[in-house]
Image (spheres, rainbow, N blue to C red):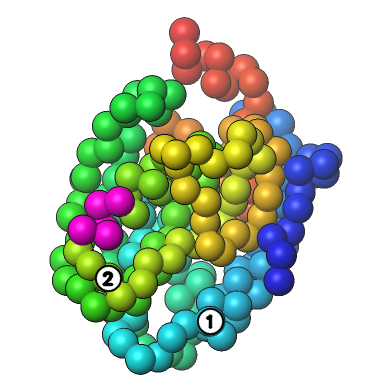
Amino acid sequence: MKPVDLTLNRLEPVPTSWNSDMLKGMMISSELIQKRVGELADEIDRSMPDDKPVVVLSLLSGAFLFTADLVRHWRFSFELDFMGVSSYGKNVASGELSWTHPMQIDLKEKHVLVIDDILDTGQTLRKVTDKLHLSQPASLRTCVLLRKERQQPSEHSVDADFVGFFIPDQFVVGYGLDFALQFRQLPFIGVLDAHVTHTAND
Ligand code: IMP
Ligand code: MG
């Protein structure tokens, strides 16, 4: 099944219990996220080879809720681990990644599925997969909930094998994604009001 394309959709009002003057609107409702997560989980389940052990590797912190919801659909056996990654100098081709939480599992000869929250330029996922390839997994695939419509992938980037939604190029928060470590707990994906990002940059 193809990713759900929301690139031309308008924002919806934020559910009243969450109404905050920091949010401009809701991009993806909790119900739509859960429906699509179920579809993605089925798609991944059907395509998962069963000849070798499977490792699911979730990137902290943004993918924590997405991972928690995905894995509850699966009945196949897998080892689950988390790896902490944060990027500095994101707009620079040579931007360094720092590993804030090392993974514990040996990936050699295992089928590895990397889960991240959002793919923007694709540089983060590229650096992560380059590093993981050194451990010689049997296969390495990637899954992201959101993929921003942007420039085509370049030699420094990578596209994801499984994508939940294509979204417009706006800064989103909620369902694990943060702005200054806040908003991760929202059950929906929202868009920040411009005054919030401006204040933070002052
Ligand atoms: P990339 O390397 O440009 O693909 O950036 C991916 C990483 O940047 C993600 O794992 C997020 O941590 C972060 N990121 C990119 N866009 C957003 C956004 O709209 N909201 C929150 N975090 C974002
Ligand atoms: Mg991230």
Determine whether the beta carbon of the residue marked 2 sits less than 8 angstroms from the nearest atom of ligand 1. Answer: no
Could you say which is closer to the camera, residue 26 or residue 51?
Answer: 51
Q: Residues in magenta?
A: 130-134
Earlier in the chain: of badge 2 and badge 1, it is 1
Residue receiving disc 2: 137
At 24% from the left and 78% from the top, the residue drawn is 109
Count all numbered tags in the image, as a single digit: 2
Amino acid type of the residue that numbered disc 2 sits on in the rendered structure? Pro
Dominant secondary structure, magenta: helix
Residue 54: image x %, image y %?
33, 80
41 vs 149, left or right, is: left
Residue receiving disc 1: 47
SS of the residue at dot 1? helix
Could you say which is closer to the camera, residue 177 or residue 141?
Answer: 141
Residue 56: image x %, image y %?
36, 71
Residue 86: image x %, image y %?
31, 39
Amino acid type of the residue that numbered disc 1 sits on in the rendered structure? Ser
SS of the residue at dot 2? loop
Residue 133 within the segment the image draws in magenta: yes
At 59% from the left and 51% from the top, the residue drawn is 146
Query: What is the number of the mark on residue 155?
Result: none
In which image quadrant can residue 193 be found? Answer: top right
Residue 122 within the segment the image draws in magenta: no
Residue 142 seen from this side: yes
Q: In whole angstroms, how far apart are the C-alphas of marks 2 and 1?
A: 17 Å
9 vs 73, left or right, is: right
Q: Residues within 10 Å of mark 2 (few under 14, many from 20)?
A: some
Q: Residues within 10 Å of mark 1 (few under 14, many from 20)?
A: few
188 vs 99, left or right, is: right
Could you say which is closer to the camera, residue 148 or residue 82?
Answer: 148
In the depicted structure, whether residue 156 falls above or below residue 61: above
In the depicted structure, whether residue 51 falls above or below residue 126: below
